[in-house]
Each structure stands twice: as C-alpha cells, then as structure tokens.
C-alpha cells in the first residue's frame, strides 16, 4: 500500500518501541490524522481473555461524555405505545414484523444501532443471520433490549458505544473524531477504559490488558503504557 508524504511524516513522530501516556498518545493520534476527512480516533484493546469460554466473554456499553462525533441512525422494533414512544424519542426507523423481509430479502441496512422491546425479540431473532455478523443484534447487556426505549435512544444519540471481544479477543471502539479537543478525547478514553476494567471476567487468570493502542482511521497505531490502568 502506497503511503503519502504526510502519513510518512506522521509516522516519523512516533516511536514504535515506546509505550506512551494517554495524553501524549492522543496528541500524536490527532497530529497523525492527515486524511482529507475528519478521521475517527479508535482504541484497540488486546485482552488476555479466551472468548471461546462463556465466562471470559466481555460485552457491554458505555456512554462517552463527549459522544462519538458521528450521527447515529437508530432502528427500533416495537409496537403500539412503545412504537409511538420510539418515534417521539427521535428514532429514525420504527417498525415490527413488516421490517423482516425488507432487511432479509432486500438487504436494507441503513441504520447503525438496533433497539428492541423484549416482546419483539422473537421477530428480531429471525434476523440473527443478517444482524449478528454485523454486530447489530440487540442485546440486554448492551441496553438495546429494553422496555425503556426513550432512555435507550437518548443514550445512543448522546454517544453510547458498545464494546465486545472479536474472534481474536480484541476490543475495537471509537472514542471520537480527530477534530475533538485533546481533553474531549481523553475524557472519552478514560470513561471507556474504566468500563472495560470493570468488565474484567472474574474467571480470567493472568494479565487482562495485553496491549492498548490508539490510532486514527488512516494513521499509525500508538501503544499505551498499560501499567497505568492496573
């Protein structure tokens, strides 16, 4: 992959062998976000968990104090009064069974988060093969299966993000945009890392946070000193 001059300059400022403090890493990540669009600043957390064991799974959600900088489109599966509540709370799309063929057969996926009331999970379950691999399946642990659809929608719009282990036991999450101030990104990062540390599975023996890296979408990764989080 051919890298531009600005990217190469940004890489020079980063010592690949060093472990940085959060503030320094965020400052470097902002400087190395040299693309022509407002890059997302991402955090990649390599854990010591083995996600094949149910008691070492990690899944949850946290509201970032400054949001993600991204407009989030919410789809809510609900009926009657709860459907009206979802519309009033600002959900972009609200529906029930009639949405199943649209998603299943027409490949409609113009939404970023799916919320469902518990009574609708039988319907949503039929979409597991489509929504599951894309990380869009509602889940009680993430607060997206709930009767309080207003709170769920408000939290998501305020900057709620979901975190979970991928197949290689790494958590990938956004903490904002390169246009955010260093203070905003630091606040968001601290809120996220506090939630992840609290979510440490009790069954896990040994080191929990193997490595934590901050990177802009198109830029190089900057490794953090994880000793500070223990």
Image (cartoon, helix red, strand yellow):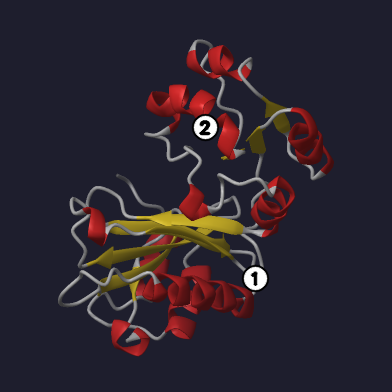
* 98 is higher (above) or lower (below) than 199: above
Specify whether 229 is left or right of 150: left
For the N terminus, the image quarter is: top left
Disc 1 marks which residue?
Answer: 65
The quarter in which the C terminus is drawn is bottom left
The spot of residue 51 in percent (x, y) is: 22, 54
Of the numbered discs 2 and 1, the one sitting upstream in the chain is 1
Q: Position of residue 11 (x, y in %)?
A: 36, 68
| Secondary structure found at label 2 | helix
| Residue at horizontal 67 percent and vertical 31 percent from the top | 78
Q: Is residue 95 above or below residue 44?
A: above
Q: Which residue is mark 2?
A: 121
Of badges 2 and 1, nearer the viewer stands: 2
Q: Is residue 213 visible?
A: yes
Q: Nearer the viewer, residue 19 or 173?
A: 173
Judge from the rendering whether residue 112 lies leftward or rightward of residue 88; answer left or right: left
104 horizontally vs 87: left or right: left
């Amino acid at each position: 992959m051919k890298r531009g001059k600005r990217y190469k300059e940004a890489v020079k400022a980063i010592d690949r062998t060093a472990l940085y403090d959060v503030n320094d890493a965020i400052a470097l990540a902002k400087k190395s976000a040299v693309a022509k669009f407002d890059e997302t600043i991402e955090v990649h957390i390599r854990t010591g968990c083995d996600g094949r064991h149910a008691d070492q799974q990690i899944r949850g959600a946290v509201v970032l104090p400054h949001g993600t900088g991204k407009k989030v489109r919410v789809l809510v599966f609900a009926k009657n009064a709860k459907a009206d509540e979802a519309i009033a709370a600002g959900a972009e799309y609200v529906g029930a069974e009639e949405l199943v063929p649209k998603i299943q057969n027409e490949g409609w996926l113009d939404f970023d988060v799916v919320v469902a009331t518990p009574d609708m999970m039988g319907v949503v379950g039929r979409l597991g093969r489509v929504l599951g691999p894309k990380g869009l399946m509602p889940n009680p642990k993430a607060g997206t299966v709930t009767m309080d659809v207003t709170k769920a929608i408000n939290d998501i719009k305020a900057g709620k993000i979901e975190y979970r282990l991928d197949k290689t036991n790494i958590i990938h999450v956004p903490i904002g945009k390169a246009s955010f101030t260093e203070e905003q990104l630091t606040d968001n990062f601290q809120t996220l890392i506090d939630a992840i540390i609290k979510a440490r599975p009790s069954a896990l023996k040994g080191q929990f946070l193997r490595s934590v890296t901050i990177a802009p979408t198109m830029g190089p990764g900057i490794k953090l000193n994880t000793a500070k989080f223990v």
